[in-house]
Amino acid sequence: MEAGSGGHLVLVRLSALGDVVMVLPLLQALRVQYPNLRLSLVSQPFAEDLVSTVPGVEFMPARVRDRHRGIRGIWRLARSICRVDRTARVADLHQVLRSRILLLFIRILRFPRWVQAATIRKGRREKRLLVRGAIHRQLEHSVERYAEVVARLGYPVEIPYRLGGLPLRPLPESLESLLHTGKGAIGIAPFAKHRAKMYPTARMLEVAQSLQRNGYRLFLYGGGAQEVATLQEWARVLPGAVVVPGLGLRLGQELQLMARMQVVVSMDSANMHLASWAGVPVVSIWLATHPNAGFLGWGQSLANVVARRDLDCRPCSIFGNKPCKRGDYACGDIAPVVVVERVMGNVKRDKPIE
């Protein structure tokens, strides 16, 4: 199809947060290159704030924890999608059992009309070889895999490899006042879903203390009761640090605040992708996982990746969900000063690192 083509494209990506964020550059590129194309994203309710950052994209909530749970729930979701448009093309960007059943039900509901649909090719074989050490090369990025799906549906799209996309909006005065102290703001997102992806908290606290001594206001990111409790403990030894979850912001507001950071320090986690969409350089710390698997924040520089490159056991998994085979988690043995120096390389400074 040529640019300007119409039609309706429904994209399905039900989880997780970081993967949904990586759909946003695709949505933005489609809006620019196909201005007459109707776009809808089916995802969990948490993604609605994210989708609203791309003007003109419709959001279809998939309430997989209640109304759309189980086989009957997926049937309800398929019916609601078909009620909106019985002719839309469907892009499955998830390729899990739930999304496959959803696509099957859409086909049944539209019978005998043919459903134009395409499913993501995740490259599972390549990723297995990467973990085994059989290949040592950069695999296709998830955003590129998403683009390949919509291309098969007749919408080839070019997505520039650059940071940002989030439209900036004014912050409340209460948040603006937090930013205008010291040399500037640095975000710290010290958590990850799995232990094998998380830099030891004691070392990350050392990183935070060093950055604070250098005159930066720290904004601490996390979610869930346990993570918030840890951040509150940190705040007691980091005077002036802001515990972002304690501000009571919606996800969209947190993104606007994150966009004001000079740099964000994170794991291979959702916050890396959120900061990328917000247009902020990320110093990302990679332990058991590896950027070669195709999950680096879109637009981020490999020069800002911190990792143990001397370990031939990395990556030991694609998602960091497996325990360390060696048992010592040596991938986390990275001196805090290494992280600090990488951070300081992304901000202006007028005196040596302390």
Image (cartoon, helix red, strand yellow):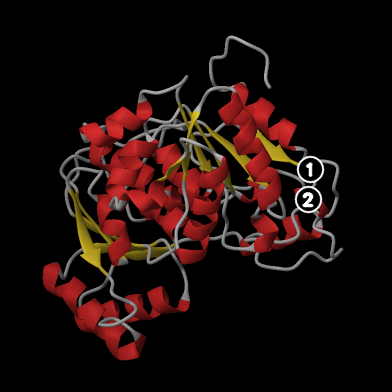
* Number of numbered discs visible in the structure rendering: 2
| 1 and 2 marks in contact (CB < 8 Å) | yes
Taking the image as drawn, is residue 205 in sight?
Answer: yes
Q: Which residue is mark 1?
A: 308
Mark linked to residue 330: none
Q: What element does badge 2 sit on?
A: helix
Residue 144 or residue 209, whichever sits in front: 209
The outermost residue toward the top is 350
Residue 157 or residue 265, whichever sits in front: 265
Task: Please state if 110 lies on the left or on the right of 255 as rendered.
Answer: left
Task: Please state if 244 lies on the left or on the right of 339 as rendered.
Answer: left
Where 188 sits versus 66, above or below? above
Q: Say which quadrant the N terminus sits in.
A: top left
Point out the tag, 1 or 2, that comes first from the N-terminus: 1
Task: Please state if 159 lies on the left or on the right of 201 as rendered.
Answer: left
Q: What's the distance in space between the residues labelled 1 and 2, CA to CA? A: 6 Å
Taking the image as drawn, is residue 126 in sight?
Answer: no
Q: Position of residue 261 (x, y in %)?
A: 43, 31
User: Who's the residue at 72% across and 44% down the image?
Assistant: 137
Residue 272 or residue 332, whichever sits in front: 332
Q: Quadrant of residue 174?
A: top left
Question: How dense is the environment of label 2, judged by Cα within 10 Å: few (below 14), some, or many (20 and up)?
Answer: many
Q: Which residue is mark 2?
A: 331
Where 334 sits versus 116, above or below? above
Give the amino acid at mark 1: Arg
Residue 211 or residue 85, whichever sits in front: 211
User: Who's the residue at 35% across and 46% down the image?
Assistant: 24
Q: Position of residue 263 (x, y in %)?
A: 50, 30
